[in-house]
Amino acid sequence: MPGARERSRSPVAGGGAAGAQPASALERAAREPADAASRRAAKPVVCYEVGMLPKVDEAMYAAARAGMQQLKELVVPARQARCFEVPAGHFFRIVSTEGPQVGDLNLWNRDDMKERFYTSKTRQLHATHLTTGDRLWSTFPWMRPMATITHDTLGWYGWDEDGGGIHDVIGSRCDPYTNHVLLGKNYNFCCHSNLTRTLVERGVPDAESHVHDVLNVFMCTGFTKDTKQYFMKASPVRPGDFLELFAEIPLLCSLSACPGGDCSEKHSADDAPGYPLTVQIFQPAAGTLQGWESPKPSGYSGRHGL
Ligand SMILES: [Zn+2]
């Protein structure tokens, strides 16, 4: 039946003949009304018009990146994370160097960590997966672009037949709490813990509370077509691939090389092959950013009707 939802998300043992069991209260509540088909036929409307967002000046970014000079490089070891700062108006790249590896990226305003990357708003404004021209937006009350993606060597991937795409803002990050709920074990090298340690090492008070939902760099994810469950599959990233971003405001970043490696089979474990990731920071060509300035925080009055 078109549109009908699978009742059970996990395979149920036994099966049994339909109608053999009396309907539970939950199942009775879910019975379709007579006009179900016409209700489902309502047309989807994209919630936010991307065309109304502040324009991405492609020519400016292209000129700035054409002659940019590399200032710095750092390596994020496998199953570890590292912090780095990127001055406003500079570019940074996350580069695959040794093998397929996904990275979990957090962003903060370097000068005020209360302003941080807001994945669900970014997802609403752009899509479940990001690529060149998309922006990484910050939390309220600032709500402004923190970074703009200026190059994505995996931009060719698009959407695969399973509905998967690259660089998602739908997964949160692997974390030891979920792992403990599922397996009853302590595992300390999930991306959440890796990111937390970088902030502790930096001396950030209450470090763990600053860790937030990530951009899943190079990760291939989606929702299953039948049950809409979050899935991952082997990342198509190969050495030499990179994601490049322009820092719209001064950034503090932390990047974790996920213990899942390419996330083809598992995460939150030490038995998946893991590889380092490299971060490169670039200064744009002189004179190419004339007239550019950091986006202003939201102009909303902040009164909330009070
Ligand atoms: Zn992870």
Image (cartoon, grey):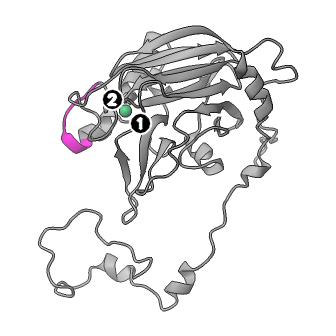
Q: Which amino acid does the dot numbered 1 rest on?
A: Arg
* Residue range highlighted in magenta: 181-188
> Given contact means CB atoms under 8 Å apart, are the residues at marks 1 and 2 in contact?
yes
* Image quarter for ligand 1: top left
| Amino acid type, mark 2 | Cys
Instruction: Identify the mark nearer the N-term, 1 or 2.
Output: 1
The location of residue 45, given as percent across then percent down, is 66, 66
Q: Quadrant of residue 68?
A: top right
Of residue 253 and residue 266, the one placed in the foreground of this image is 266
- Residue 190 bears which disc, if any? 2
Which residue extends farthest top?
71
Label 1 CB less than 8 angstroms from ligand 1: yes
User: Is most of the magenta stretch helix, strand or loop?
Assistant: loop
Asked if the beta carbon under badge 2 is closer than 8 A to the nearest atom of ligand 1, the reply is yes
Residue at coordinates 57% horizontally, 80% vertically from top-left?
A: 41
Residue 55 vertical placement versus 164 (above, below): above
> Could you say which is closer to the camera, residue 123 or residue 201?
123
Res. 161 image quadrant: bottom left
The residue under label 1 is: 173
Q: Position of residue 203 (x, y in %)?
A: 48, 10
